[in-house]
Structure formats: C-alpha cells, structure tokens
C-alpha cells in the first residue's frame, strides 16, 4: 500500500483515495492526471473496494489503454488481461460482440472506417440514382455522423427544408443498407450500444451493477453521445449510481472540430453531483522555462476555467527558437540539433518532432533519411507509402516501364474507369498465354473489356507523349491531372489531405532534381546524359561506375522512382528499434519526451489558416500549441521558416503569433546559419547574402523574376502607408505585385510598376 501511494503529492494522494463518489480532477498538462487515474484503479483493487472486473476505464487512444494496462501490472500482482480498459469505440465493440443478438447485429458484423464509409455512401447514392452533385457523399457522411454523435436516428432529426428532408431520408436508407450488409460505422458503435442499454433494462442493470467505478481520461474531449453513454452506464442520478472519476484539462480541448464539447465538464459537475473537484497544480514533466512558456501562452485565451502550473524542477534550458530561410534549412537544423542530443546520450525515442499538418513531414523525413537516422511516423504514414502517393508513382512507373505489372494492377482501374474483375481475368489469361506483361497483353483482349483496357493504355501513352520534353516536376503535375487522381480525391475521404500530399509530390520532384544535380530543364524521360559529355577513359571507352552522378546513369524519372522506392522501403525503423518520433500535434496528446521540436510556426500553418477567421478557432489552435509545448521535459525547440514549399508552391509566411506570445525571459533566439534574418533588417538581406540567393536558386525554390529590383524582405517606405516590409512578390514585369506588411495599415497588395516606394 505504502508503495502504491508514496510517490504522490498531497493533492494527488487526495484524488487517488477519494471516497466512492463522482469526482472531477481538473488540472494542467503534466500534473499527473493519467498517473492519478491509473494509481486510483490500482488502489481501489488493492484495498478490495472493487474487483478488476468491476472497473471500466476509458482512454483516448488504444496506445494509452495499452500503456495503462502495463502500468497497472507493474503496480499490482494481477492479471490485467480482460479488464475493461479501452477507448469508447473499443469498449462498445466489445459490448456489441457480446450482445450482438440483442443489439440486432450479426455476430460477424464488420466495422467501416471512415474511408470505407465514404465508399459505402457513394455506392448507396449510385444504387439509388441520387445525383451526387446535389447530395455530395462527404456532406451526407458528415450529416450522418454528426446526427449519430448527437444520439439521433433519422426519425429524430428535424428537417426544415427539402434538402434536409432528403438528407434525412438518405440517412435512413444508409442505416437500412448497413443493417442488410451487417456493417457499422464508428459513431454507430456508440449509438448502438447506447440504444441497446437504454432499451434493455436487464442488461443495463447488469452492467450498472457490475461497473461500480468508471474512470475517464482526457474528459475534455468527450462528445455529446459519449457523455450520454457515460451517464447511462453509470446510472447517473440513481441512488446506486457508479462513481465516475473524470480527469481533464480544458486548456487541452483540441477536438471541438469533431464535436467534442468542453461544456461536458460543467454538465458533469452538475449532473453527477460532484462534491470533489480537485485541482493539481504541480507539474512533474517540464522544466521551468518550458512550463512558463506554456502558462504565458495559454493566458491569452479568454474562455478558461482557470488554473496554473508550477514546477520544482528549476528553470532548465531556455526554449530555443530558430528562424530558417527555407523548410529544407529548418529540417537540416533539426537534424543537427537532434544529432547533438543523441551524441550527448539522449535516446532517439526521447526526441519528438511535431508538426501541425501531415504534409509538413515530407521534408523532415527526407532530411532524416539522408542523415541515416531511424525514425517512426505516428498517426500517419511515411510520405512515399501513402496510398495516393503510391497511385501517382504507379502512373509514373508505367510511363517509365509499362511492363511493371504491379503498377499496372494498382491503377488500371483507379480512379475507376469501368474495368472490372472479369476484364482483368481475361487480360491475365492472355498475358499468361503469351508470356507477356499485362500492358503488352492488352491488344489480345477483345470486346468491351478490350476497348476499356486499350483506353487505359492510350492514357499512359498520351501521358508519355505530352510530357516527353518536360522537366520532372512539370511531368508529375501533368500526370496528376491526366490520371484524374486530383479530381478523384476532390470527392474522396480526407480528400483535401490527399490532394495536399499529391502536390507535395511535385515539391519532392523539384527538390530531388536540384539535389541530384540534374539540370532544372532536363526532360524527365530523356536517357542518361550523352556519353560524349562524360570524361572518356584512355582507350576511348566511357566508364560509368556506381559512384557516377545520377544524371550520367539514369533519366530524371527513373532516378526519382528508385529514390521513392528506397525511401519508402529502406531505413524503416524496426519495431522496438530506437527511433526518432514524428507526429502531428494532435497525436502527441498525453505523451511526453525529453526533447521536443515544434516546427513550422508560421501564420497560416500554426495557427492553421482554416482556423484563423474566428477567435474561437485561434483559441483552439492556441490550446493545440499548449499541448505541443507541454510534451517536452527538458528541451524545447521552436522553428519557423521564411519560405516553405507546400502544395507545390513556395509560400512566404510571417512567423506565428504564438512565438510573440511567449515570455522573453524563457527564450533564446538562435541566429540562422545560412543568412541573417530578412525581416526587420534595415538593409535587404539579399544585398548581403548573394550566396543565399544562389543557394535558393539551386534548390529550385526561387521564382527568379523581374521584380523591378524589389526583393522579399526589403524594407520600404510608402507615401501613404509609411514603413513596411515586402512579404511576397507575384508576377513579373508590368504585372509584378507585392504583398507588403505596413504594420498598423495591415497587408497591402501593390503594383510594383506603379507604386511609389522607396527602399529604406
Ligand atoms: P497530460 O495532461 O499531458 O495528459 P498528465 O496530467 O496526465 O499530463 P501524467 O502523464 O500523468 O500527467 O504525468 C506527467 C509526468 O509526471 C509523468 O512522467 C509522471 O510519471 C510524472 N509524475 C506525476 N506525478 C508525479 C509525482 N508525484 N512524482 C514524480 N513524478 C510524477
Ligand atoms: Mg494524461
């Protein structure tokens, strides 16, 4: 007993040993909420207040559930297998499997993930001859999911106009078809369990009697249905209700966009007659400068329940901030710093690199790959392994070598072009019979199948023809268009993300070409540089060895494709191997690392542009930044870049407002390694740093253009708006225009050929 409790501070101890009543632990990051929750489970069991089977604990991710079970087995000599500790979805799945008949489901019901769900909806619309322009599948999916998240079936949704009436009717059709096929979506798992228990009194009473203690981690991110589900499970309001122990932090509520309702915290206090509200204010995770940064940042939010955090750990290292000239330089700086940490003895797995959106990981992955540092990407796939990238690569592979059958199979009917299993069977027979590739066998297939297949071959041929003189990045762009991959993903699950990734492929090609020393204009399909250009050996025979530069041995396209496969397949950290951790800020919730890098701290990226229109959006982004900062124990590194290749375009962003909200005393600004900062310089940085310009050109990132002598970063004086700084230039010659930040007058777009500007 002593053992279990002796590592707790007085508030934690009070929380762990609360009497069996509902309680809310409201506390900031790193204050030990998860530890308290786990220790309470152990304490309840050890003191005989409840058996392991009488506990229901809800965590936010499967990973967290596993971790909790591991910690429990370390604390107690019990077998934790079979304990009801899991996510809402996992626990509901388990209940529905056990009571499938009562729930009206086949025993083998299958779960649709959101991708499956969208395909399912498309099929449904088609089968019912519904115009999917009027009723876009994704809109319908969102409609259905948010109704379910509020606990509403089609019959309960109020529709006030024709459109909504139709959506409701489709929702009904959708549910009926799911039922026929024996499938359930994510929200259905919860709703179905909720309905089962509401309707079935014996079952409900059974579970209410069984689970005397319900514990919920990350309570701030529960949605309405989850909250109702908890109320039902606990028998809230009844004499014999279960004790619900909820821990959460309103400052870490980051899922409002998915229906999470932080208001559930006050509802909980009221409806569960919470008499025990405990705040934990001692932080055990982070050193002082890191914690101060988090506290000062989050104080900028208006809607807070109010609490603070302190630490005994001392100030520790200052938070280091790096301004890079490009995203590539940013990545290289991170790698250098990470190497230093590793040299000093840090485990790779104790270093995390966080970013706001998945598309940012490509440049970082590339730098890690080049440096030969093992890494693991969480909550997302490695760039070249993503399905949409693999599809695009398959088209390029077929253009490079049409006899690559796996590439053929991957995209022959993707996006769908009416080539079904029967046609493929015929084609495979023909290929087998003649001993040739699928591509080559197409002319041997007749009939309707043959003509659809021939159309696909024509598509590949025309992509080849149309791109034969184009450099690699342009070729990739044309292929994305011709293959209709881009249009396809416009209607797909998380299409925006996938389109973003496809555009990143264009950026990857641009970077690849310049790094490998191909000329920027070199046609992607052309063979190796002519033998004549290579130094000839004495006997006149040209020698090309394995060390020769790529342009000498491969076309840009072939070289790029082999790079893609190598980077996808190789250097993959093995399970258990000590690897750097890459993830989005969202997926870092609840985790901690010795050292954390938060990258891309730029306006539009973090805070994300989609959230910048409303104050509540910025507040949610700020909470996300708070989550990110508080992941770090000892070292925190923040970085931003003046230029960034995103969506296949170079962007010039201002640094994130969050950086300016941090306390100066805790920060250490590092000067960029390649060149001085552009912003705030009296003289144009370009004047002083021709090498940097050359560098950017070499990276293929400059829009070399006639801008009337103006440069990004130039400080200017305007007769009306006063002093400003050029943050972007677009167009050239007479159509050149500049975005200029005039401070109090804001951002202006001025025509450079006519604006009256002076350099200062
Ligand atoms: P988050 O809000 O990020 O989920 P949390 O409040 O759940 O954080 P924990 O992860 O439980 O915090 O704890 C943070 C760290 O502090 C962990 O490494 C934990 O082991 C440690 N810790 C918590 N309480 C104590 C304590 N009393 N003494 C020493 N270490 C502690
Ligand atoms: Mg936690």
Image: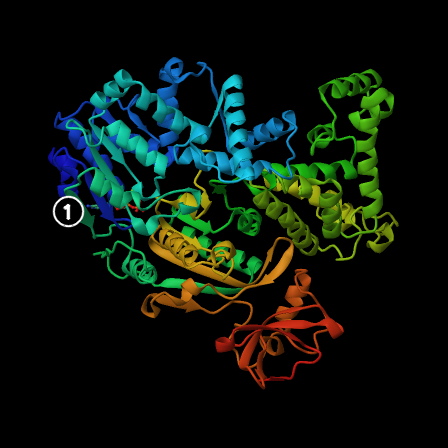
Q: Is residue 207 above or below residue 550?
A: above
Percent x, y of residue 725: 56, 76
Tell me the SS state at disc 1: helix
Q: Quadrant of ligand 1?
A: top left
Q: Quadrant of residue 694?
A: bottom right
Mark 1 sits near ligand 1, with its Cβ under 8 Å away: no
Residue shown at the point (25%, 34%) measured from the top left:
215
**Quarter of the rendering occupied by the C terminus:** bottom right
Instruction: Give the image's coloring scheme.
Output: rainbow
Q: Quadrant of residue 139?
A: top right
Regarding residue 348, the answer to whether it shows in the image is no
Percent x, y of residue 651: 60, 61
Percent x, y of residue 243: 19, 32
Count all numbered tags in the image, as a single digit.
1
**Quarter of the rendering occupied by the N terminus:** top left
Q: For the residue carrying disc 1, how many other residues have a C-alpha within 10 Å: few (<14), some (14-19), or many (20+)?
A: some
Residue shown at the point (14%, 38%) measured from the top left:
5
Q: Is residue 198 above or below residue 135?
A: above
Q: Tell whether 741 sits left or right of 151.
A: right
Regarding residue 500, the answer to whether it shows in the image is yes
Q: Tell whether 465 sits left or right of 366.
A: right
Q: Tell whether 513 sits left or right of 758.
A: right
549 or 675, which is in the foreground? Answer: 675
Percent x, y of residue 482: 76, 42
Q: Is residue 298 above or below residue 737?
A: above
Where is mark 1, residue-wise? 11
Residue shown at the point (47%, 55%) measured from the top left:
611
594 or 194, which is in the foreground? Answer: 194
576 or 187, which is in the foreground? Answer: 187
């Amino acid at each position: 007993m002593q053992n279990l409790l002796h590592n707790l501070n007085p508030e934690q101890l009070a929380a762990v040993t609360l009497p069996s009543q509902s309680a809310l632990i409201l506390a900031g990051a790193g204050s030990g909420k998860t530890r308290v929750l786990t220790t309470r489970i152990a304490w309840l069991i050890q003191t005989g207040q409840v058996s392991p089977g009488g506990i229901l604990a809800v965590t936010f991710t499967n990973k967290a559930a596993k971790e909790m079970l591991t910690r429990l087995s370390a604390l107690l000599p019990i077998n934790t297998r079979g304990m009801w500790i899991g996510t809402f979805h996992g626990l509901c799945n388990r209940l529905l499997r056990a009571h499938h008949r009562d729930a009206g489901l086949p025993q083998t019901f299958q779960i649709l993930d959101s991708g499956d769900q969208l395909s399912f909806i498309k099929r449904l619309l088609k089968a019912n001859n519904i115009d999917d322009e009027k009723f876009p599948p994704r809109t319908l999916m969102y409609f259905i999911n948010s109704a379910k998240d509020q606990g509403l079936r089609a019959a309960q949704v109020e529709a006030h106009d024709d459109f909504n009436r139709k959506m409701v009717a489709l929702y009904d059709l959708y549910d009926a078809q799911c039922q026929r096929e024996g499938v359930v979506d994510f929200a259905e798992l919860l709703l179905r369990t909720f309905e089962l228990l509401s309707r079935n009194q014996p079952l409900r009473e059974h579970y209410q009697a069984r689970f005397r203690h319900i514990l919920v981690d990350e309570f701030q991110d529960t949605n309405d249905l989850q909250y109702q589900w908890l109320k039902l499970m606990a028998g809230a309001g009844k004499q014999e209700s279960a004790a619900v122990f909820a821990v959460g932090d309103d400052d870490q509520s980051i899922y409002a966009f998915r229906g999470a309702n932080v208001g559930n915290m006050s509802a909980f206090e009221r409806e569960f007659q919470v008499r025990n509200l405990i705040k934990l204010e001692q932080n055990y995770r982070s050193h002082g400068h890191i914690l101060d940064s988090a506290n000062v940042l989050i104080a900028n939010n208006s809607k807070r329940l109010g609490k603070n955090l302190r630490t005994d750990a001392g100030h520790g290292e200052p938070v280091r901030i790096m301004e890079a000239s490009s995203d590539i330089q940013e990545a290289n700086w991170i790698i250098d710093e990470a190497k230093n940490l590793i040299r000093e003895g840090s485990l790779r797995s104790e270093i995390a690199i966080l970013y706001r959106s998945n598309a940012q990981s490509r440049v970082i992955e590339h730098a890690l790959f080049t440096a030969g540092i093992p890494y693991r990407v969480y909550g997302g796939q490695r760039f070249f392994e993503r399905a949409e990238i693999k599809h695009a690569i398959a088209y390029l592979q077929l253009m490079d070598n049409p006899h690559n059958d796996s590439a053929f199979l991957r995209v022959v009917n993707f996006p769908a072009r009416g080539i079904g299993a029967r046609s493929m069977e015929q084609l495979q027979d023909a290929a087998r019979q003649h001993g040739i590739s699928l591509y080559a066998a197409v002319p041997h297939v007749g009939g309707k199948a043959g003509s659809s297949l021939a159309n696909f071959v024509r598509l590949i041929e025309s992509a080849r023809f149309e791109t034969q003189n184009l450099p690699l990045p342009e070729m990739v762009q044309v292929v994305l268009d011709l293959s209709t991959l881009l249009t396809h993903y416009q209607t797909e699950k998380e299409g925006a993300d996938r389109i973003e990734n496809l555009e990143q492929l264009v950026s990857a090609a641009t970077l690849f070409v310049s790094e490998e020393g191909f000329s920027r204009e070199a046609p992607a399909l052309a063979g190796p540089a002519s033998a004549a250009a290579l130094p000839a050996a004495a006997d006149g025979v040209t020698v090309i060895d394995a060390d020769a530069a790529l342009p000498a041995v491969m076309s840009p396209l072939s070289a790029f494709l082999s790079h893609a496969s190598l980077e996808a397949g190789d250097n993959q950290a093995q399970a258990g191997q000590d690897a750097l951790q890459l993830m989005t800020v969202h997926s870092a919730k609840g985790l901690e690392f010795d050292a954390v890098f938060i990258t891309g701290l730029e306006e539009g990226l973090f805070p994300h542009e989609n959230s910048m229109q409303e104050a509540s959006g910025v507040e949610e982004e700020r909470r996300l930044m708070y989550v990110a900062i508080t992941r770090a124990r000892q070292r925190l590194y923040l970085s931003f870049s003046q230029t960034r290749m995103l969506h296949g375009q170079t962007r010039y962003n201002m640094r994130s407002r969050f950086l300016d909200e941090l306390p100066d005393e805790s920060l250490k600004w590092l000067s960029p390694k390649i060149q001085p900062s552009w912003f705030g310089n009296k003289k144009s940085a370009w004047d002083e740093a021709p090498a940097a310009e050359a560098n950017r050109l070499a990276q293929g990132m400059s829009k070399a253009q006639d801008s009337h002598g103006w440069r990004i970063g130039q400080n200017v004086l305007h007769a009306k708006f006063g002093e400003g700084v050029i943050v972007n230039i677009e167009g050239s010659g007479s159509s050149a225009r500049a975005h200029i930040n005039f401070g109090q007058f804001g951002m202006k777009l001025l025509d450079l050929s006519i604006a009256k500007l002076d350099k200062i």
